[in-house]
């Protein structure tokens, strides 16, 4: 049975740890200087970063006709016939005068569960095609695919 890792955080786990350590150092220094508004803002950013780091997929692996998602606190497994759609979504975040576009490959199961994988054209350009081919190869009816 072939096993293919299509997504793994790797370096970004270490980056998340360093960001959290940096935020803790800033908070300790702000507490010493009694800057409570700054402490609140930095702690809020730290909590958001920690939430994203802990609850986003750490890896997604294709193994035969099964797709496995691993997070820090959970693991989910779906068979190819349980997948309803695979599509590329682009989400635009507005902040101040700028915009930031982020793309995700969303794998939606028939029971409503969604595996959302960050999609970078330079890091993993063929992830959508790999998932589509995997699904077509492991199901008899194919897949409803959409690419925005």
Image (tube, helix red, strand yellow):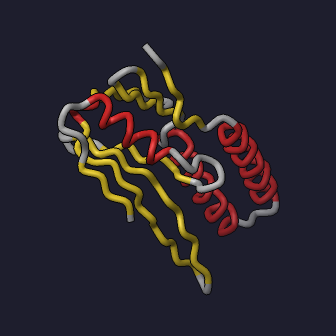
31 in relation to 95, above or below: above
**Residue placed most toward the observer, 20 or 8:** 8
Q: Position of residue 15 (x, y in %)?
A: 72, 44
7 in relation to 138, above or below: below
73 in relation to 93, above or below: above
Q: Position of residue 67 (x, y in %)?
A: 37, 29
**Residue placed most toward the observer, 146 or 140:** 140
Most extreme residue toward the top, as rendered? 1
Numbered label tally: 0
Most extreme residue toward the bottom, as rendered? 97
| Residue 110 found in image quarter | top left
User: Measuring 75% from the left and 43% from the top, which residue is drawn there?
Assistant: 18
- Looking at the rendering, in which quadrant would you find the N terminus? top left
| Residue 66 found in image quarter | top left
- Looking at the rendering, in which quadrant would you find the C terminus? bottom left
Q: Position of residue 16 (x, y in %)?
A: 67, 44
Q: Position of residue 138 (x, y in %)?
A: 29, 28
User: Measuring 22% from the left and 33% from the top, which residue is drawn there?
Assistant: 82
Left or right: where does residue 119 sit relative to residue 46?
left
**Residue placed most toward the observer, 72 or 99:** 99
User: Measuring 37% from the left and 60% from the top, which residue is drawn there?
Assistant: 147
Left or right: where does residue 49 sit relative to residue 135?
right
């Amino acid at each position: 049975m072939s096993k293919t890792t299509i997504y793994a955080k790797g370096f970004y786990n270490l980056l998340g740890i360093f960001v959290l350590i940096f935020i803790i150092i800033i908070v300790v220094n702000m507490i010493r200087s009694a800057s409570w508004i700054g402490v609140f803002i930095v702690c809020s950013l730290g909590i958001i970063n920690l939430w994203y780091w802990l609850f986003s997929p750490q890896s997604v692996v294709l193994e035969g006709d099964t797709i496995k998602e691993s997070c820090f606190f959970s693991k989910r497994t779906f068979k190819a016939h349980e997948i309803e759609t695979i599509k590329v979504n682009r989400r635009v975040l507005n902040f101040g005068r700028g915009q930031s576009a982020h793309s995700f490959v969303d794998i939606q199961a028939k029971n409503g569960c969604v595996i959302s994988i960050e999609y970078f054209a330079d890091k993993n350009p063929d992830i959508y095609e790999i998932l589509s081919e995997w699904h077509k190869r492991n199901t008899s009816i194919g897949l409803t695919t959409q690419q925005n």
